[in-house]
């Protein structure tokens, strides 16, 4: 199920780096959470054999006693029913369920929802660990826009060259810093990009360093604004407390908003309350 936090960026398709980085608490609620949190991979695998199994297990993991109380959800049973239905409804179109990927996803969800304070890092881990639960139809070299276009169960990702909006389903070949990256599937690791001229994994620009939206990218957490009279330099994305419209405005990737509001504030963590938009999916 796609992450319920709409303002949090999902991990995007692999970038080729050709010029850039490419919730009333009940004993049942608590026990359901503890079962998932303490279960091993084999136990979780047995509980997630089908898509319906997965959605029910994930809903129970999300609807902890803390979440139900903090968000003032009707009760744990209603929360689970609502979240399971949303999970089934929001399966990425054209994808198939991959049971083997479900245990890691549920463990990430259990960790993130261990308390009523949600951390940006924990929500980011959900995005990363839960994406492979669904695999797309695209075979190798099929044109794509997002990873869900590709058969992730076969190791394919949507590798998009920098400054382009589409790419190909390829098996990424991860290259370390300073290594050669001449092939279309080569993806530089860490804060490095594949220089389009030298085809070598080169360091991305840091804060205050010169950048270009076509040739020299900024490292994660920074942006390269439009060129001014003296060129552009990498500037940081929003810090906690800064105004934001979406998670892309924030270094943490999390834009926290009040229910019904279009603007919020960047945050590293959010204490759940009934008036917070993060609680809306559980009410």
Image (cartoon, rainbow, N blue to C red):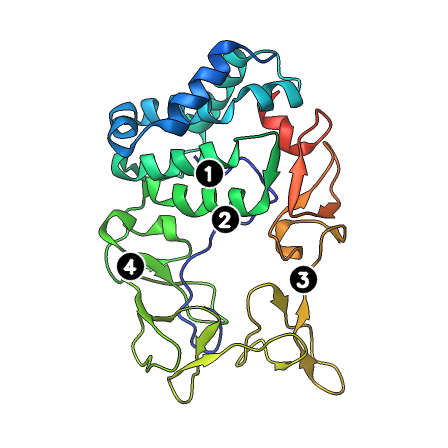
Q: CA distance from mark 2 to mark 3?
A: 17 Å
Image quadrant holding the C terminus, namely: top right
Q: Local crowd at mark 2 within 10 Å, few (<14), some, or many (≥20)?
A: many
Q: Local crowd at mark 4 within 10 Å, few (<14), some, or many (≥20)?
A: some
Image quadrant holding the N terminus, namely: top left
User: Of 168 and 35, which appears nearest the observer?
Assistant: 35
Above or below — where is 197 with respect to 62? below
Q: CA distance from mark 3 to mark 1?
A: 24 Å
Which numbered disc, 4 or 1, marks the residue closer to the eye? 1
For residue 81, say whether it is visible. Answer: no
- Number of labels in the image equals 4
Above or below — where is 58 with respect to 264? above
Residue denoted by label 2: 10
Residue denoted by label 4: 142
Pointers 2 and 1 in contact (C-beta within 8 Å) = yes
Q: CA distance from mark 3 to mark 4?
A: 33 Å
Please tell me which residue is depicted at 24% across the width and 59% down the height of the picture. Answer: 140
Query: Which badge, 3 or 1, is on the more N-terminal residue?
Result: 1
Pointers 3 and 1 in contact (C-beta within 8 Å) = no
Q: Local crowd at mark 1 within 10 Å, few (<14), some, or many (≥20)?
A: some
Q: CA distance from mark 4 to mark 1?
A: 23 Å
Residue most extreme to the front? 38
Residue denoted by label 1: 2
Residue denoted by label 3: 237
């Amino acid at each position: 199920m796609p992450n319920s936090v709409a303002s949090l960026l999902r991990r995007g398709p692999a970038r080729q780096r050709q010029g850039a980085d490419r919730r009333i608490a009940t004993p049942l609620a608590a026990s359901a959470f503890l079962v998932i949190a303490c279960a091993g991979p084999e136990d979780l695998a047995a509980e997630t054999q089908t898509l319906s199994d997965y959605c029910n297990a994930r809903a129970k993991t999300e609807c902890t006693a803390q979440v139900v109380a903090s968000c003032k959800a009707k009760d744990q049973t209603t929360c689970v029913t609502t979240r399971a239905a949303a999970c089934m409804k929001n399966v990425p179109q054209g994808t198939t369920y991959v049971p083997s990927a479900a245990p890691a996803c549920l463990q990430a969800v259990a960790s993130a929802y261990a308390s009523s304070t949600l951390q940006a890092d924990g929500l980011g881990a959900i995005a990363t660990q839960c994406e492979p639960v669904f695999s797309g139809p695209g075979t190798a070299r099929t044109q794509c826009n997002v990873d869900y276009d590709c058969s992730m169960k076969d190791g394919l990702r949507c590798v998009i060259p920098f400054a382009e909006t589409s790419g190909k389903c390829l098996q990424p070949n991860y290259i370390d810093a300073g290594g050669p990256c001449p092939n279309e599937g080569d993806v530089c690791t860490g804060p490095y990009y594949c220089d389009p001229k030298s085809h070598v994994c080169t360091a991305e620009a840091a804060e205050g360093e010169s950048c270009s939206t076509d040739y020299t990218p900024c490292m994660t957490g920074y942006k390269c604004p439009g060129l001014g009279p003296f060129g552009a330099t990498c500037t940081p994305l929003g810090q906690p407390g800064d105004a934001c419209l979406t998670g892309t405005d924030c270094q943490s990737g999390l834009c926290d908003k009040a229910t019904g509001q279009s603007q919020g504030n960047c945050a590293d963590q959010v204490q759940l309350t009934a008036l917070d938009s993060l609680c809306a999916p559980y009410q």
